[in-house]
Image (spheres, helix red, strand yellow):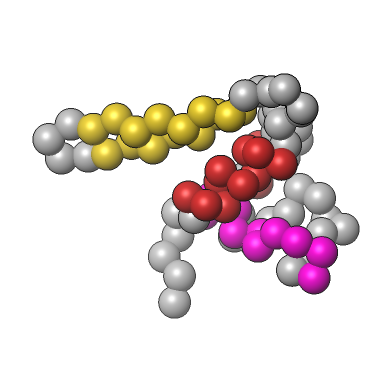
Amino acid sequence: MLVNLITNAIQHTPEKGDVGVRLTQDDQHALISVQNTGGGIASHNIPRIFDRFYRVESDRSRLTGGSGLGLTTEPTS
């Protein structure tokens, strides 16, 4: 999942843009954040970012690249 997030950040960052990965922690938790200077997610797609296998670019498939993992928090079986 982390590789997928970082790869997406790199792919959607313009040339000479920035990608940052940060790890913070406390006694019980670790937080990993990935940020980039890309265009971001269009507002009409934001409600769907946690939909499993949703693809913003509907023409993409496993054959053309990407896994379509989304950011789902639901358990998988």
In the picture, measured across the screen, residue 5 lies left or right of residue 30, that is: right
Tell me residue 51's x, y (percent). Answer: 60, 54
Q: Residue at x 44, y 77 (%)?
A: 77
Q: Main secondary structure of the magenta part?
A: loop
Residue 31 included in the magenta stretch of the image? no
Q: Quadrant of residue 31?
A: top left
Residue 71 lies, in percent from the top left, at 54, 50
> Which residue does the image show at 71% across and 31% down from the upper left?
13
- Relative height, residue 6 to residue 35 (above, below): below
Q: Is residue 69 above or below residue 10?
A: below
Q: Is residue 36 left or right of residue 56?
A: left
Foreground residue, 7 or 30? Answer: 7
Camera-nearest residue between 8 and 77: 8
- Bounds of the magenta segment: 63-72
Query: Which quadrant of the view contains residue 40?
Result: top right
Residue drawn 63% across the image and 38% down it = 9
Q: Is residue 73 visible?
A: yes
**55 above or below 42?**
below
Q: Position of residue 39 (x, y in %)?
A: 74, 26
Q: Position of residue 14 (x, y in %)?
A: 76, 28
Q: Residue at x 50, y 34 (%)?
A: 34
Q: Is residue 64 left or right of residue 70?
A: right
Front residue of 43 and 38:
38
Task: Please determine whether, in this image, residue 71 is positioned above or below residue 23.
Answer: below
Query: Between residues 44 and 16, which one lies in front from this camera angle?
Result: 16
Quadrant of the rendered structure where residue 52 is?
A: bottom right
